[in-house]
Amino acid sequence: MHRDLPATSSVVPFHVGGPVMSLSALPERPGVSAWRAQVAAGADPVAMADAARVRAWAAAQTDLGRPVWIHLCDDAAWQRQIDRLGERLQSCPTRAEALQRFPLLGVPFAVKDNMDIAGAPTTAACPAFERLAPEHATVVQRLLDAGALWVGKTNLDQFATGLVGTRSPYGRPASVFDATRISGGSSSGSAVAVASGLVAFALGTDTAGSGRVPAGLNGLVGLKPTPGRVSTAGVLPACRSVDCVSIFAHSVDDAAHVLSVLEGPDARDAYSLFSPGRAALPARPRLGVPRQAVFHGDAGYASAWPDALARAETLGAELVELDFTPLFDVAALLYDGPWVAERHAVLQALMERNPQALDATVLKVVSKAVGMTATDAFRAQYRLRELQATLAGLWQQVDALLVPTTTGHPTFDEIDADPVGVNARMGTYTNFVNLLGWCALALPSGFTDRGLPFGVTLIGPGGADAALARWGQRWMAADPAASAAPGSEPAAPKLPGPDATVRSLLRWPATEPTLALAVVGAHLSGLPLNGQLVERGAHLVQATRTAPLYRLYALPGTTPPKPGLQRVAEGGAAIEVEVWAMPQAAVGSFLALIPAPLGLGSLQLADGTPVHGFLCEAHALAQAHDITAHGGWRAYLASLGSASAGSTSPAT
């Protein structure tokens, strides 16, 4: 085993020649936001990093902490990282510049032990499979280039096969909230390392839910990107065609910041497909939810789910009940179909040479591939295409899905009694996502009446990673106490969310380029033509006013009724508008819908910002009624008491 743990009497030394920091000086749970804020405020990142490493090594000597790790960074490798951190600090005249150049400056992280770190062993939780990595996985290299420091490699369900976290010879991590219950898997050690405050964030992998289920069982955010958005080069495949690298973090802001570092095309990865999507969901998104949610066990999930739905509605979401049968049919293909042969492709040689080296349950799962044929594989591909066609209209019905992250929180005894059946139930709401090329974001959602964490997951179409994260920010902000069990002190309390100053230091994942478009009339939220914006993926940025340079007119004979806006040299007023961000790729089709005498031109907002927006040809205003005094189209419609007004409440 590659624990490399020091003797109890010999804690790993601090950075040679550096200052010694008391462990109590570090945040209880050192999230990325808090870490960067402390560095920006003048704290020494070298001393902080050394103290964080000592904490991780000390935890690894305890019964609860030992199963988290497979390999910890040794003294020589750590010293090289610390030396590099010192060089980076010296190369930047200010902390602000250092944090700008190195967005993860000194931040400690962990990776699941199916990812390569040059010079360190990769085992995938199978000692017989161990090999020394010749180079870093792309994701590790990008984190190190951004200034982060690796602390160790974490435990997992062997070969990333499982959602329970119990299929490893290196031990069985427990949930930080209940030592009798599983941590979830397969990224078990990564989730517990973050939830225990041993690292600021950690990487997992997610093929069937391994980056989401452990997040839900440990009160964390689990970000699973769109397949292909983050490179898997240097990551031991589970199902290579659908594998994703995932992120465990304390907040949506932290996870999004790390994703901004990891994402991007990679020539080393044949499955790399970086295509950023929309920036945000609509202000009042339509969220598809299961018509009848399924739960198992005694964790109290069934009573926590209605509270989560109510919270979504409080945030303005419209809940749309859906039949999830086609999604469950997709999910069945992952383990019951020939995709399990992808796992066999990785393990075939070891299974033939030394099958006893594999965990018994993992061997049973992967051995199903032996009897499958190429014919089975093509039939399954045909079936997947049929299901994709059935689901083609889903994203016209809803903007995202909202599901329980998993169906319950089993005890170790329950897993031991039925390791395959319990594992299968855990993936009810996760197994279908990657086969469909979608993205997902697991979020904490308070606690059950048993004092256990409950989690929900947002699921969106491919490329919607940033949009889910934006709504995830709203979800977290709506209940900052969601991570504290009612009536008790949680096992590992979370840091508060980052304030505006800290958030301004963070980066955000890439989104498709957009055009800022000011609308003044029938395209306003809730009015008849607003759907032309929404169906093109536009999202509301702000409700504001123009500079006092315009006059507004009610155009005669238009259906639906529309106003005309004209810039004037004198006598102008500030007119109410909404600014929407429209994907540039959709602007052409939108322009084709605009009838004369309207068109798009340049508008100036109240703060002086220039944007594109609706203007009217001057000749059409000769017979139009001047309604400038109303200050906007909504107010004018309200003054008429017209049925054509639709919803006249202002957008938020």
Image (tube, helix red, strand yellow):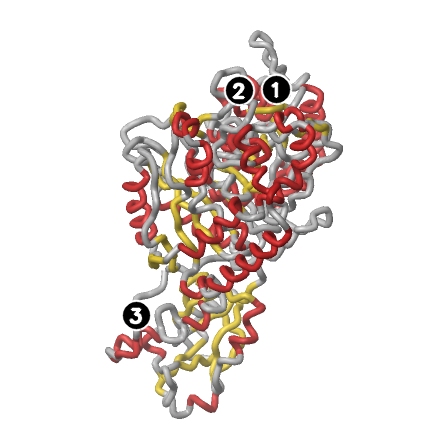
Label 2 CA crowd tier, 10 Å (few <14, some 14–19, many 20+): many
Q: Which residue is mark 3?
A: 647
Image side of residue 215 versus residue 136, left or right: left
Q: Which residue is mark 2?
A: 66
Q: Which residue is mark 1?
A: 3
Nearer-N-terminus badge (1/2): 1
Residue 559 visible at all:
yes
Q: Return the x and y of residue 120 as percentages of the image width and height.
A: 69, 27
Residue 145 visible at all:
no
| Residue appearing at x 43%, y 33% in the figure | 218
Q: Kindly identify the amino acid type of the residue bearing the numbered disc 3.
A: Ser
The C terminus, quarter of image: bottom left
Image quadrant assignment for residue 137: top right
Return the residue nearer the eye: 617 or 462. Answer: 462
Q: Return the x and y of residue 649 as percentages of the image width and height.
A: 30, 66
Nearer-N-terminus badge (3/2): 2
Q: Return the x and y of residue 128 as percentages of the image width and height.
A: 66, 25
Image marks 1 and 2: residues in contact by CB distance under 8 Å? yes
Label 3 CA crowd tier, 10 Å (few <14, some 14–19, many 20+): some
Q: Kindly identify the amino acid type of the residue bearing the numbered disc 1.
A: Arg
Image side of residue 422 versus residue 645, left or right: right
Image side of residue 475 versus residue 25, left or right: left
Residue lying farthest to the right in this orientation: 134
Return the residue nearer the eye: 7 or 394. Answer: 394
| Residue appearing at x 40%, y 72% in the figure | 575
Label 1 CA crowd tier, 10 Å (few <14, some 14–19, many 20+): some
